[in-house]
Image: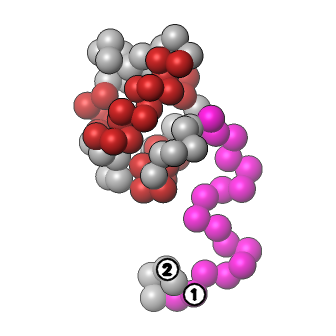
Amino acid sequence: MTNGREMKSSESAMPVDAETDLPDELSQPARRALLGAGYSRLEQLAGLKEADILRLHGMGPKGIKQLRQALAARGQSFADGT
C-alpha cells in the first residue's frame, strides 16, 4: 500500500532498468535515497563527502559504513578520504 492506494503489479519501488552496483546489503531506505538523488554507481560516490551522503533522507551511519567498505574494496574512498 502506498499513499493510501494499492500498488499495481506494473509499478515497482525501484526502476527495473536501474543499473546499479550498490552493495546488496544496503537497506532499502538507503538505496532509495541514493537512487532518488541520482546515484546508482559506487564510482559516483567516490567524489562526494560522507557528510553530503548522510544528508539524504534514509541514509544513516550503517549505510555509510557499507558504502565505505564497498568503495575500499575497489580502491576508492569518499572525497574526504574516508
Local secondary structure at mark 2 = loop
Image color mode: secondary structure
Q: Residue at x 53, y 19 (%)?
A: 73
Kindly identify which numbered label has been placed on residue 27: none
Where is residue 71? Give x, y as percent. 49, 22
The residue at the point 74 percent across, 50 percent down is: 17
- Distance (Cα) linking label 1 and label 2: 6 Å
Residue 82: quarter of image: top left
Q: Residue at x 32, y 24 (%)?
A: 49
Would residue 12 be counted in the magenta stretch?
yes
Q: Amino acid at mark 1?
A: Glu
Is 44 left or right of 62, judged from the image as shown? right
Residue 44 visible somewhere in the drawing: no
| Residue 15 placement: quadrant | bottom right
Please tell me how crowded label 2 is: few (under 14), some (14-19), or many (20+) other residues with Cα within 10 Å.
Answer: few
Q: Position of residue 14 (x, y in %)?
A: 61, 58
Asked if residue 67 can be seen in this view, the reply is yes
The amino acid marked with disc number 2 is Thr
Q: Which residue is mark 1?
A: 6
The residue that label 2 is drawn on is 2
Indicate the position of residue 59 as horizontal and vertical percent values.
34, 46
Q: Is residue 26 left or right of residue 20?
A: left
What residue appears at the point 52 percent right and 88 percent down from the top-left corner?
5
Which residues make up the magenta segment?
5-21
Mark 1 in CB contact with mark 2 (< 8 angstroms)? yes
Q: Secondary structure at mark 1?
A: loop
Which of the 4 image quadrants contains residue 8?
bottom right
Work out whether residue 4 or residue 60 is closer to the camera in this orientation and state it.
60
Residue 46 on image: x %, y %: 46, 20
Q: Up-down: is 51 above or below 6? A: above
Q: Nearer the viewer, residue 78 or 66?
A: 66
- Establish if 33 lies above or below 50: below
